Image (cartoon, rainbow, N blue to C red):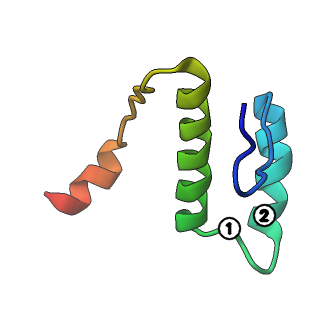
Amino acid sequence: MEPTPQQRKIFKTTQDWNDYFGPLLQSDTPILGAQLFDLRKACYAEIETLRGRPLLVYTTVPRKCLSRYA
């Protein structure tokens, strides 16, 4: 596997994610939505490379969020 241009944190468990993300929420410079999106895209790209095929991701949007667009 080729290394990614920017080495990112590897999450093996949900606890790893909580340990990484929790302090960011409490810090003076919280992580931004765009940074999370970039992290997620990098994770997906790496998974696709390892699997050798596209990764399908299904998500849901809470009804509360949808009411803003009605």
Q: Which residue is mark 1?
A: 31
Q: Residue at x 54, y 39 (%)?
A: 45
The residue nearer to you, when weighing 66 against 47, is 47
Q: Which residue is mark 2?
A: 24
Classify 10 Å Cα crowding around label 1: few (below 14), some (14-19), many (20 and above).
Answer: some
The residue nearer to you, when weighing 46 against 67, is 46
Q: Quadrant of the C terminus?
A: bottom left
Question: In the displayed structure, does residue 56 sit left or right of residue 42?
Answer: left
* Position of 11 relative to 32 (above/below): above
Mark 2 in CB contact with mark 1 (< 8 angstroms): yes
Disc sitting over residue 66 in the figure = none
* Position of 50 relative to 23 (above/below): above
Looking at the picture, how far across and down is residue 30, in whole percent?
Answer: 71, 72
Q: Quadrant of the N terminus?
A: top right
Q: Residue at x 33, y 53 (%)?
A: 65
Q: Residue at x 53, y 66 (%)?
A: 34
Question: Amino acid type of disc 2?
Answer: Leu
Classify 10 Å Cα crowding around label 2: few (below 14), some (14-19), many (20 and above).
Answer: some
Q: Secondary structure at mark 2?
A: helix
Looking at the picture, how far across and down is residue 49, in whole percent?
Answer: 57, 29
Mark 2 vs 1, N-terminal side: 2
Q: Residue 10 appears in which quarter of the rendering?
A: top right
